Image: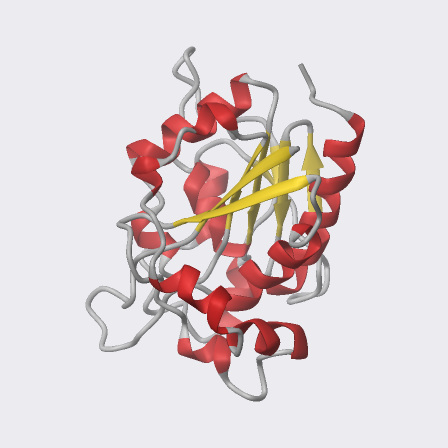
Amino acid sequence: MKKIMIVNTSHSQFDGAEQPTGLWLSELVHFYDVFHGNEQYQVDLYNIKGGNTPLDPVSLKPIIIDKLTKSYYENELFMDQLKLTPSIDTADPSTYDVIYFTGGHGVMYDFPGNEAIQQAVNTIYDNGGIIASVCHGASALLDVKRPNHRFLIDGKQLTGFSNVEEVLAQRQKVVPYQLESELKVKGANYVKSKIPMKGFVVVDGQLISGQNPASARKVAEAVKDKLSRGKEI
């Protein structure tokens, strides 16, 4: 059995703005659904603080939410997991083959600089496991350093929510930083789709990243494919 840990945000509001945020639900659901119910995989949910995982209300709007995400949103057992989520501090990353970071703007605040995230990423990476993210979830990798003191993403090809997409989402004035720009500052070879908001995935060794909400299932499929072919080291 392959073990996958999914990490969500605990942050519910844009700092300095009376505007709610949180997990973009489809970015969890579309990844989770690829593995759920398959005895070959164990999928565990975590967030930063433990307890309730806030949801970005925009991700639940009728014009945004898709059929699959809505079915999970209406599933009490699944939603109970999001209301009573254990903190990543309680996880033992050495037992996992994959760590996946979901998005939503909340992660921009509580993923970077989190020591438990950094330890989990390095542990799983050193064990030959997969480090995966979608959209703003790549912010989890901004401060992860290797034993040689270089950033994990330095020189690595990856993607995440682009500056153009931030403008299209009308969040460029309330976000704490531009994710695309920060990934480049940390040495990442950032790449993106020519068409904003279109599903796009980048695989660079043990790193698998998706650009936007439309990429979550594609990330899961890439993770599944890599797991089927064995670890890198």
| For residue 18, side relative to residue 177 (left or right) | left
Q: Residue furthest top?
A: 148
199 relative to 113 in the view: left or right: right
Q: Is residue 223 left or right of residue 75?
A: right
Q: Residue at x 70, y 54 (%)?
A: 34
What percent of the width, then of the height, locates residue 100? 54, 44
Q: How is the rendered protein coloured?
A: secondary structure
Q: Farthest left residue?
A: 16
Q: Quadrant of residue 31?
A: bottom right
Q: Residue at x 58, y 79 (%)?
A: 65
Please state the horizontal and vertical placement of residue 13, each as a whole percent of the image.
27, 68
Where does residue 142 sit, x and y in percent of width and height?
A: 41, 38
Q: Is residue 67 above or below residue 160?
A: below
Residue at the limit of the structure toward the bottom, as seen here: 62
Q: Residue at x 37, y 65 (%)?
A: 22
Residue in the foreground of this view, choosing between 128 and 152: 128
Q: Nearer the viewer, residue 21 or 220?
A: 220
Quadrant containing the C terminus is top right
Residue at 42% across, 53% down: 8
Which x, y percent locates residue 154?
Answer: 52, 27
Quadrant for the N terminus in the image: top right
* Total numbered badges shown on the rendered structure: 0
Seen from the viewer's position, the closer of residues 122 and 17 is 122
Q: Is residue 164 above or below residue 5?
A: below
Quadrant in the rendering for residue 85: bottom left
Judging depth in this view, the residue of 231 and 172 nearest the camera is 231
In this rendering, is residue 146 above or below 174?
A: above
